[in-house]
């Protein structure tokens, strides 16, 4: 495993462990989004969350997307879309395909 992959996985584990109840809630919302949209980005899940349930950092969505992928709910596409979230500074985000 490359060092970058290892460090990424460690960061994802830290977020999921520190915010387990939030990740569980976001995964539930992610399933709902996947049941209504054929393709979407993590921004769509972020926007579907109640404002009170959003963490300060949008990168916390990483463990949510990985858990949805492992569960077979979503599959990555080879496309990206610029984020509409101001705090993400228009960075590209992966487009995911719903498997529901």
Image: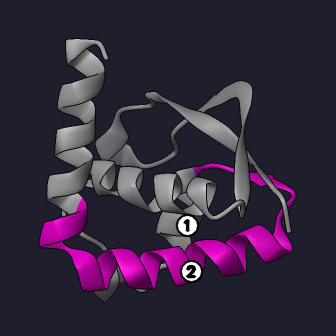
**Few, some or many C-alpha atoms within 10 Å of disc 1 (few <14, some 14-19, many ≥20)?**
many
In depth, the one of 90 and 100 nearer the eye is: 100
Left or right: where 78 falls relative to 45: right
Q: On the image, numbered disc 2 is attached to which residue?
A: 29
Residue most extreme to the front? 1
Main secondary-structure element of the magenta-colored stretch: helix
Identify the secondary structure beneath mark 2.
helix
Report the Cα–Cα distance between label 2 and label 1. Answer: 7 Å
Identify the secondary structure beneath mark 1.
helix
The magenta stretch spans which residues?
16-41
Q: Is 22 within the magenta? A: yes
Q: Is 20 within the magenta? A: yes
Image position of 57 with respect to 1: above or below:
below
**Residue at the spot x=62%, y=49% of the render?**
41
Image location of residue 91, percent across then percent down = 43, 28
Image location of residue 50, percent across then percent down = 42, 86
Give residue 78's quadrant in the image: top right
Q: The N terminus is located in which quarter? A: top left
Image position of 77 with respect to 3: above or below:
below
Give residue 74's quadrant in the image: bottom right
Q: On the image, numbered disc 1 is attached to which residue?
A: 45
Left or right: where 81 falls relative to 5: right
Image location of residue 89, percent across then percent down = 35, 33
In depth, the one of 29 and 99 nearer the eye is: 99
Image location of residue 30, percent across then percent down = 59, 72
Q: Earlier in the sequence, mark 2 or mark 1?
A: 2
Image position of 7 with respect to 20: above or below:
above
**Residue at the spot x=49%, y=52% of the render?**
66
In depth, the one of 88 and 79 nearer the eye is: 79
Q: Are marks 2 and 1 in contact (CB under 8 Å)?
A: yes
**Few, some or many C-alpha atoms within 10 Å of disc 2 (few <14, some 14-19, many ≥20)?**
many
Q: The C terminus is located in which quarter? A: bottom right
């Amino acid at each position: 495993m490359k060092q970058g992959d290892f460090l990424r996985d460690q960061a994802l584990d830290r977020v999921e462990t520190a915010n387990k109840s939030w990740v569980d809630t976001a995964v539930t919302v992610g399933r709902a989004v996947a049941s209504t949209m054929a393709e979407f980005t993590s921004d769509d899940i972020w926007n579907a969350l109640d404002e009170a349930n959003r963490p300060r950092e949008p990168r916390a969505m990483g463990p949510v997307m990985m858990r949805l992928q492992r569960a077979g709910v979503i599959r990555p596409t080879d496309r990206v879309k610029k984020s509409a979230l101001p705090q993400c500074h228009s960075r590209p985000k992966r487009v995911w395909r719903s498997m529901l």
